[in-house]
Image: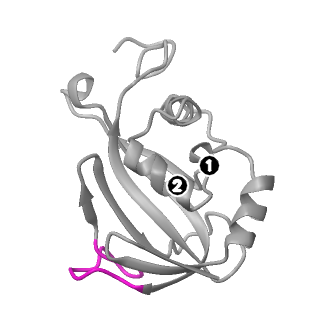
């Protein structure tokens, strides 16, 4: 186990279990436009540099997120992007959390960053039921641009 501390969170990571699991894992598999948009950005490493540095330090391939969801897009989405929630699962445990209110049962406080926010906790839904235990998730919310060469609502609809 390796101790890792960032943003007020301290975790103990089973680096071998993380590397082994992600080595055999496929990319995020949803084929909707919003998920394909995320995958295109992740493959080209066009996520915020600070987030990429965090994922790299944890041996997490950006395109192998364990949860991806475009939460909503407002009328001004072309200017600020689409709000996504992204998660990656890690083998290990959270040993300390930053001060502040929890962000739901099993989740620590949301830490604001210039590009969005992140929090650590345990997703209760079986996102990846075969993942080594114990485990936890790093989840973030951030705005991402639409980069696909198709309308945002789908290939057969207008913007």
Left or right position of 45 against 127: left
Q: Image check: 113 left or right of 134?
A: left
Residue at image mark 2: 55
Residue at the outermost bottom position: 95
Give whichever of 99, 157 is nearer the camera: 99
Residue at 78% across / 63% down in the picture?
Answer: 20
Quadrant of the image containing the N terminus: bottom right
**Does residue 120 sit above or below 31 in this rendering?**
below
Residue situated in front as seen by the camera: 2 or 89: 2
Q: Secondary structure at mark 1?
A: loop
Please tell me how crowded label 1 is: few (under 14), some (14-19), or many (20+) other residues with Cα within 10 Å.
some
Position of residue 91 measured from the top left corner of the image (x, y, whole percent): 64, 74
Estimate the spatial distance between the alpha carbons at disc 2 and disc 1, rounded to whole Å.
Answer: 7 Å
State the SS at label 2.
helix
Q: Residue at x 74, y 71 (%)?
A: 16
Residue 90: in magenta span:
no
Residue at x 18%, y 27% (from the top left corner): 76
Give me the residue at 21% from left, 24% from top: 79
Q: Residues within 10 Å of mark 2 (few under 14, many from 20)?
A: some
Which residues fall within the magenta stretch?
A: 96-109
- Which image quarter holds the C terminus? top left
Q: Are marks 2 and 1 in contact (CB under 8 Å)?
A: yes
Image: 55 above or below 128: above
Can residue 129 be seen in the rendering of this structure?
A: no
Taking the image as shown, residue 91 lies to the left or right of residue 149, namely right
- Is 58 drawn above or below residue 73 in the view shown? below
Across and down, in percent, residue 29 comes to 67, 42
Q: Is residue 72 visible?
A: yes
Kindly identify which residue carries mark 1: 61
């Amino acid at each position: 186990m390796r101790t890792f501390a960032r943003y007020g969170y301290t975790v103990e990571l089973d680096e071998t279990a993380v590397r082994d699991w992600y080595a055999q894992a496929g990319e995020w598999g949803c084929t909707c436009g919003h998920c394909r948009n995320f995958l295109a950005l992740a493959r080209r490493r066009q996520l915020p540099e600070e987030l990429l540095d965090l994922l790299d330090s944890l041996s997490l391939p950006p395109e192998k997120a364990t949860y991806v969801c475009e939460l909503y897009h407002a009328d001004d989405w072309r200017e600020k992007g689409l709000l996504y929630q992204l998660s990656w699962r890690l083998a290990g445990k959270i040993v300390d959390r930053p001060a502040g209110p929890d962000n739901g049962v099993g989740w620590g406080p949301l830490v604001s960053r210039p590009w969005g926010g992140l929090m650590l906790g345990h997703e209760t839904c079986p996102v990846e039921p075969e993942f080594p235990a114990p485990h936890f998730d790093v989840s973030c919310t951030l705005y991402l641009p639409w980069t696909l060469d198709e309308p945002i609502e789908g290939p057969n609809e207008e913007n």
